[in-house]
Image: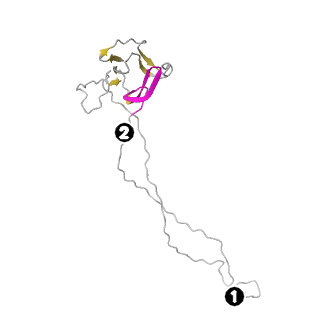
Amino acid sequence: MDLSVSINDDPQTILWGENAEIKTAENPDHPTGCIGLKLDFPLNKITGYMKVCFSLRTVYTIGPVNVCLFGGNTTATGLTVCGPVCGSSESCESIFYQKESICVPVTITPYATSGTATATCCGTPIIRQGTTCGGEQTSCTFTVTQNLCIEIPISFGAAIETGAASVQCGNVSEEPCDCSETPEEIPTEVRDRRFFLR
């Protein structure tokens, strides 16, 4: 990390482990409990202003970074500045659309189910002597025709399967990636992110 601090435009000497430290969740700052880059420089609360500039050698996601201030035995936190979100490993997501024409064969198979037969007597019974019945058939057959309206619900969708991922390797550099449309051969401008705490 490249770090510079100036107070009232006067450059300060950086002494790592003394006036500049990296505080982690396992070893937070005492007594504030804050984590991250800690800078310990005296600053006049009325006329003083501090300018902090640093650059990182690793690319991080840009997002809100908490600012923790301590002075007069009082901790002020909850303010944020736009900066590198350390520890973030979010991937970028792209959404694609494709028009499809879906065709599916549909088969309709008819069926008929008989209910329980009900017999109703029509007139008085006729009694004859002997065991021979009139008629030669043991059953009667007839047909019934019924028009139907078939309601066919069909849900359409698509299952997505991705193939094996491949990568096209670019040049290795210690500088951040340039996501513009500029061809890779053209040198890109390196910009340092600068944060000002007052």
Name which residue type carries label 2: Ser
The image quadrant where one finds the N terminus is top left
Residue at the spot of label 2: 94
Sequence-wise, which precedes: disc 2 or disc 1? 2
Quadrant where the image shows the C terminus:
top left
In the rendered image, the vertical position of residue 116 relative to residue 179, given as above or below: below
In the picture of the structure, the residue carrying the numbered disc 1 is 123
Q: CA distance from mark 2 to mark 1?
A: 82 Å
Identify which residue, 60 or 51, lies in the foreground: 51
Question: Considering the numbered disc 1 on the image, is that residue within a helix, a strand or a loop?
Answer: loop
Image check: 185 left or right of 108?
Answer: left
Residue 101 % position (x, y) = 37, 53
Residue 52 in sight: no
Q: Callout 2 environment at 10 Å: few (<14), some (14 to 19), or many (20+)?
A: few
Q: Residues within 10 Å of mark 1 (few under 14, many from 20)?
A: few
The tally of labels here is: 2
